[in-house]
Structure formats: C-alpha cells, structure tokens
Amino acid sequence: MSSRSVSAVVPASSQLEGAGMVVHRTFPGARLDMVDPFLLLDELGPADFGPGEAPGFPDHPHRGFETVTYMLDGVMEHRDSAGHRGVVGPGDVQWMTAGSGLVHSEMPDSRGGPLHGFQLWVNLPAADKMSDPRYQELSAAEIPEWSGDGARVNVLAGAVGDVAGRIETHLPITYLHVRLDPGAAFTQPVPAALNAFVYLSDGSVSVGGEDVAAKATLLLDGDGDEVAISAGGDGADLLLLAGQPLREPVARYGPFVMNTKAELAEAVDDYQAGRMGVI
Ligand code: FE
C-alpha cells in the first residue's frame, strides 16, 4: 500500500446560508468547484442560539442528487412535501435521495441551544436523477463505530476494517467521521480510482507530509491506495470522504443539479408549477 499525498488545501470560508445560518464551506467556491461525485460540503455552526434565534432552511426544492445531514449537536427538524417528517438529533444521519424532486424544510429547534452538523451533497448518476425520493435515516446508536489506538470512527457509509456502514449508496461512497486523540494516527484504504478528501473540522493533522490546521479541506491525490492521517498536539476531528467519480456533465442552479441546461429549465418549471409538491 502507498499513501496518498495532498494535492491542495482549501481553507473554509464562513458565510450565511438559508435564513442566516453560519456555515463553513470549502466547496463549491472559487478555489474548488466540486470533488466528483461530491457537490457541496457545509459545516453548520458550531453555534449557540437563544430561543427563536436559530435560523434554518425554510421550504426549498431539490432535484437530481442526495443531501446528507449529519448532526453532532442540536437537532434539525425535517418536513417535506410528501408528508415525511423527521428529527435529526445528535449523532444521527439522514441520507435523503431527492431524485426527481421534493420540497422540504430543515429547521433547528425553536427553543434554541447548541447547533453543529454537516450537510453533504452527493451527485446521482444521470440514470438515477429522476428516481423516486428516498430516505435512509439512522440514529446515533444505529451508526457502526470502529475504534483503534486513540481513534474513534463513526462509519456512515463504506467500511473500516470489518465494520461496515449501513447506508445504501448509488456509487461506492465512503463517509467516515474520525476523531483522533493528540498524536494518534488513522490509516484507511481508499482505492486510487476513488476521489477522496479530508474535511478538518477541529484540531490539526499531518497527511502526506503536509501539516494543516482546521478548518480546511485537504484534497487527496490519486497517487496511492490509502490515506494516512496523524493528529497534532490537540487531536483532530475530521470527515474522510471518498467516492467513485461520475465524470458526467454537471449543470447546477441552486438546489437543482442535472446534466444539461434544458433539464435545469425543466426543474425550475416543474418546481414553479408545484409539480415537486408543496409543504
Ligand atoms: Fe435542503
């Protein structure tokens, strides 16, 4: 096995999304458009809100991809136009395949409190973009955990050793939440054919001889078949993501991600005509 090196480090910028939620984002942005098949990664917060203060993401549509919400602290209440309701609490994941489209809202607890989580957008192959919407929801207790020397890993998708995640994905996808004690190391096999990156939420790491401090995305070269991460003196809290690239044309407009401009125009028409539903 040989370790992948870091091809680019993209520092996160903070910005306001939805109704004013503070998010840390490394892509899409000026420095990095996407990491095929991943279209977006936002770290929500961490923030602390008083009652009624927490802004959320009121009614909006999606078509053509998947949104993955993983909360670490606080809750996100979810409703959609098909009548689906759910609460994503600390440690829970909601893997939503928007497919042909729906309208949903994602709102924090109106009573306030801490809020910290991640939202990842995963593209769908052209053949699956108009599939029926689907939810896969796992509570914290249902997410398999792997632990090693100074390392704890929540396996959302993919596998670490013989610990396999339970989410069914359209493409080979690995989504790991890795927490490392100071100085601890973690190595994960990632085939060279998969695109991969590390999002460092907290602490510092050394990967392929590159030292990086939070918050940043470390793009990994396809020059090896494993990712070796060592934590700095304060430990590290990070996401490791890998996925098989689609290598298909991407046409995106806000909450719609299709393959052509004509399909985007159709998505806007369908949404405006209420064909994606209304909450
Ligand atoms: Fe959404």
Image (tube, helix red, strand yellow):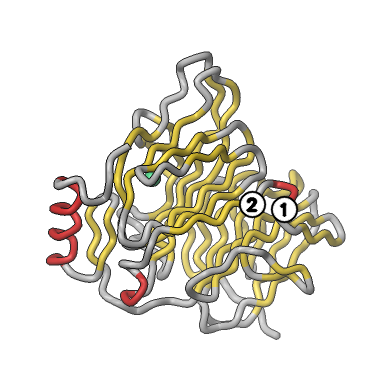
Residue 149 point in image, percent of width and height: 87, 60
Tell me which residue sits at (39%, 65%) in the image: 123
Residue 127 point in image, percent of width and height: 33, 77
Residue 142: numbered disc: 1
**Structural distance between the alpha carbons of marks 2 and 1:** 6 Å
Q: Are marks 2 and 1 in contact (CB under 8 Å)?
A: yes
Amino acid type at circle 2 is Leu
Left or right: where 224 falls relative to 147: left
- Name the residue nearer the viewer: 182 or 164: 164
Query: Quick one: which residue is furthest to the front in this view?
Result: 83
Establish if 260 lies above or below 273.
Answer: below
Residue 240 point in image, percent of width and height: 60, 61
Tell me which residue sits at (48%, 48%) in the image: 119
Tell me which residue sits at (38%, 63%) in the image: 132
Residue 246 point in image, percent of width and height: 39, 77
Q: Secondary structure at mark 2?
A: strand
Amino acid type at circle 1 is Glu
- Name the residue nearer the viewer: 51 or 273: 273
- Name the residue nearer the viewer: 135 or 123: 135
Q: Which residue is mark 2?
A: 138
Left or right: where 269 falls relative to 126: left
Query: Quick one: which residue is furthest to the top in this view?
Result: 51
Q: Quadrant of the C terminus?
A: top left
Q: Quadrant of the N terminus?
A: bottom right
